[in-house]
Image (cartoon, rainbow, N blue to C red):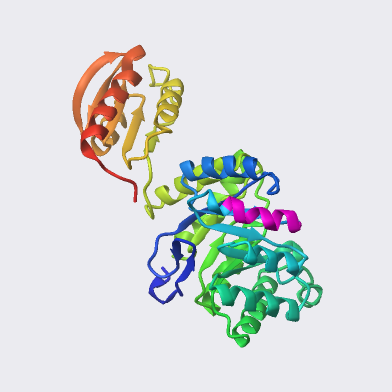
């Protein structure tokens, strides 16, 4: 496990990453940033879903100007995503971006990077040095005979060294590839060479189903080693799903808590209730709950009682009926049709008097 006390702390708007601060959840809008209203609506949905830092694409000057109005109407830090045109980075900084993400492989050379760094330093905002396996510098690709983890680290280290020479030190580093193993290897190597915060993600991971699996494997493998200060789950899906997925990963690793943790047993021939429907109903109903509670939906008496005793609330199925439990104690025995409603009533009563908040 990596000692995180020596990780540099970087301020991004009202969020600090690095050191012993919690792993921050990020996402990126899928709207046209020039459509301010649509972008704001999506960011507000992301805020509700637990997104703590949001990134928007800045493809032109109009999008850069839109950042000013967007920032005024959101409650989380705003990051400008810049490719190819360093002037857009300068414009985004002028419009009040809380951080600028640039890719050294396509920003246009050292002098332009230096100019962006100076502008960021003047207003005291950080840069994210975003290294993607698919857009490494040509000489690095040639040196390593293709995009490799070692090449990604060298690209990042070049940018870090240059920016430090420019007396710029507010950096977050990301090394992403669509290849899970390459992403993991690159970030392990990067952590061995620098103490800047690392932003984790498996880029171009895929659709909601496959992308979540690949992201959970890659990001989870790194977080388990104490590597990573911010995460984004890159999905070909509604960005809100990215925020939900990020929180599920963090909760599964017991790094953070927010909202319910649902435990449900797998199907087997012993189950005598419609467990799939019960679990889906409970999951949907709990989607609006923000308190960090643990809820178990179990299908039979084999694993049910044990899991239910450990959960805050639980359903344990029987033959067309089941038990509803709270803190390991049976509070009701009801028919299958009333299991979910009885469970939710108990949860609502507890939340109204408990006052627990997510961490």
Give the prevailing secondary structure in the magenta stretch: helix
| Residue at point 39%, 64% (across, down) | 21
In this rendering, is residue 298 above or below 20? above
Q: Quadrant of residue 153?
A: bottom right
Q: Position of residue 247 (x, y in %)?
A: 45, 47
Q: How many marks?
A: 0
Q: Position of residue 271 (x, y in %)?
A: 39, 21
Looking at this rendering, what residue extends furthest in the bottom direction?
A: 165
| Residue at point 41%, 48% (across, down) | 252
| Residue 178 visible in the snapshot | no
Which part of the image, by quadrant, shows the N terminus?
Answer: bottom left
Find out whether residue 69 is within the magenta segment: yes
Task: Read off the magenta span.
Answer: 60-70
Q: Quadrant of residue 20?
A: bottom left
| Residue at point 49%, 45% (across, down) | 47
- Between residue 142 and residue 134, name the one nearer to us: 134
Q: Position of residue 237 (x, y in %)?
A: 63, 40
| Residue 71 visible in the snapshot | yes
Q: Position of residue 266 (x, y in %)?
A: 43, 31
In this rendering, is residue 41 above or below 265? below
Find out whether residue 49 is within the magenta segment: no
Q: Quadrant of residue 310?
A: top left
- Between residue 212 and residue 62, name the one nearer to us: 62
| Residue at point 54%, 52% (across, down) | 72
- Between residue 336 and residue 81, name the one nearer to us: 81
Q: Is residue 236 left or right of residue 172?
A: right
């Amino acid at each position: 496990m990596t000692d995180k006390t020596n990780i540099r702390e970087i301020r991004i708007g009202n969020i600090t990453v690095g050191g012993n601060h919690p792993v921050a959840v990020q996402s990126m809008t899928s709207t046209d940033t020039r459509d301010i209203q649509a972008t704001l609506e999506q960011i507000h949905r992301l805020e509700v879903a637990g997104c703590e830092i949001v990134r928007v694409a800045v493809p032109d000057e109009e999008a850069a100007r839109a950042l000013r109005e967007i920032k005024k109407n959101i409650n989380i830090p705003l990051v400008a995503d810049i490719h190819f045109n360093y002037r857009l980075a300068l414009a985004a900084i002028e419009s009040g971006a809380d951080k600028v993400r640039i890719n050294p492989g396509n920003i246009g050379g050292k002098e332009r990077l230096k100019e962006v760094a100076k502008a960021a330093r003047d207003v005291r905002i950080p840069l994210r040095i975003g290294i993607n396996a698919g857009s490494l510098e040509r000489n690095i690709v040639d040196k390593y005979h293709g995009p490799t983890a070692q090449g990604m680290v060298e690209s990042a280290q070049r940018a870090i060294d240059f920016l430090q020479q420019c007396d710029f030190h507010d950096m977050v580093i990301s090394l992403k590839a669509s290849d899970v193993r390459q992403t993991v290897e690159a970030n392990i190597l990067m952590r061995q060479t620098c103490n800047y915060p690392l932003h984790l993600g498996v880029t171009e991971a895929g659709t909601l189903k496959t992308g979540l699996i690949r992201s959970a494997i890659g990001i989870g493998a790194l977080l388990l080693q104490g590597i990573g200060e911010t995460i984004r789950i890159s999905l070909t899906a509604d960005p809100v799903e990215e925020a939900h997925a990020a929180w599920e990963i963090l909760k599964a690793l017991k790094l953070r808590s927010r909202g319910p943790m649902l435990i449900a047993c797998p199907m087997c021939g012993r189950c005598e209730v419609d467990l799939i429907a019960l679990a889906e109903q409970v999951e949907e109903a709990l989607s609006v709950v923000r308190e960090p509670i643990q809820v178990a939906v179990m299908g039979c008496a084999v694993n049910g009682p044990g899991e239910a005793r450990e959960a805050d609330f639980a359903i344990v199925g029987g033959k067309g009926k089941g038990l509803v439990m709270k803190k390991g104690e049976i509070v009701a025995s009801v028919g299958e049709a009333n299991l979910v409603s009885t469970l939710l009533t108990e949860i609502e009563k507890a939340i109204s008097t408990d006052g627990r908040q997510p961490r």
